[in-house]
Image (cartoon, rainbow, N blue to C red):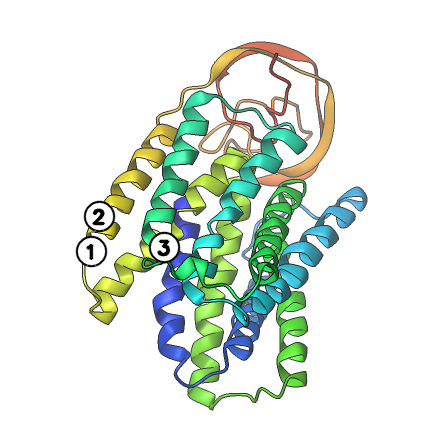
Amino acid sequence: MALGAALLFGASTPFAKLLLTDANPWMLAALLYLGSGLGLAALRMLRRLRRTDTPVSRMQPGEWPWLAGAVVTGGVAAPVLLMFGLSRMPAAGASLLLNAESVFTALLAWFAFRENFDRRIALGMAAIVAGSVVLTWPGQGALLNWASLWPGLAVLGACLGWGLDNNLTRKVALADAGFIAMSKGLVAGGVNLALALSLGARLPSLPILLSAGLLGFASYGVSLVLFVLALRHLGTARTGAYFAVAPFFGAVLAVALLGEGLTLALLLAGGLMALGVWLHASERHAHLHTHEPLEHAHSHVHGGQGDDGHHDHLHEPALPPGTRHRHSHGHTALSHSHVHYPDAHHRHRHD
């Protein structure tokens, strides 16, 4: 799911490049966000009308501040900071600095939100980030031609905002992923649209408008849903590391669709990212750990495919094995050992 999110988001770069010939950059950013929000809203409405969707986890009262913080930092503040930086510095330098998002995501997850990691995970993260740097290195000192320090700090501020967004979203990852992504898209798209119009940008032609909306739905909406689902199982830092390969997917698609040349930098970046993904995917984290008593609500399964082994409570009447359902349930204290990730049920401390 994390790699799928990265593939969809990475695909937005070459396709958006085609749309930029007929659309203002700020306006295009707004349309991409709105496309994600409106597309997911339409999909949710269709599923409700057809009554084919399974029960989902609704937001709990204590989760709303986390979602609001994620929307403000990643959906509103970060895009504005990025646009400010892009308007006053070379695009190549900004592209390089955008790789700091995965670094901020991991550092905040590890040191502020206390998510566990080891040397293997840190090395894999470093390899993926190194691949991103190789892929986006401007060459010929382009990064040094800044008019001032402030534009670079603005882009780094945007990366910090998205890093905070990723960690705050982790706090609500057990809720309805579609609702989370829809909310971010509608709010961020609305704010960016208002800003673009206030700066004199105009709506593009209908074909460009529809194309941008569809691209936003796939590359921002569906991608974010997959990202949130991955957060549930992998934790923030690991999901962020997988998502950091998005620039590589975008570059590969640019070669295939736009006829751009296959470069040594692309091959080297691909090798470094493949190494980092392998280090993460081959991780086997197992030790004796204790689950403290916990009560929460989310979608889960008893027995059959999808059972994670941590939901053994009883139901009256009994549910058929494999039935996905949602309700408030408790977990009793339990000590055992098995391979696990820092998912929603394994946020214990490591000494």
User: In the rendered structure, which disc, 1 or 3, sits on the residue that comes first in sequence?
Assistant: 3
Residue at 73% from the left image edge and 46% from the top image edge? 66
Residue at 66% from the left image edge and 73% from the top image edge? 190
In front: mark 2 or mark 3? 3
Q: Identify which residue, 326 or 180, lies in the foreground.
A: 180
| Residue that mark 1 sits on | 263
| Residue that mark 2 sits on | 267
How many residues crowd mark 3 within 10 Å: few (<14), some (14–19), many (20+)?
A: many
Mark 1 residue type: Thr
Tag 2–tag 1 contact (CB < 8 Å): yes
Mark 3 residue type: Thr
Q: Is residue 49 visible?
A: no
| Residue that mark 3 sits on | 136
User: In the rendered structure, which disc, 2 or 3, sits on the residue that comes first in sequence?
Assistant: 3
Q: Secondary structure at mark 3?
A: helix
Task: Calculate the distance from the C-alpha at mark 2 to the C-alpha at mark 3.
Answer: 13 Å
Task: Calculate the distance from the C-alpha at mark 2 to the C-alpha at mark 1.
Answer: 7 Å
How many residues crowd mark 2 within 10 Å: few (<14), some (14–19), many (20+)?
A: some
Q: Is residue 339 left or right of residue 344?
A: left
Task: Calculate the distance from the C-alpha at mark 1 to the C-alpha at mark 3.
Answer: 12 Å
Query: In which quadrant of the rendered image does the N terminus lie?
Result: top left
Q: Secondary structure at mark 2?
A: helix
Splitting the image into 4 quarters, where does residue 288 fall?
Answer: top right
- The vertical placement of 57 against 201, above or below, is above
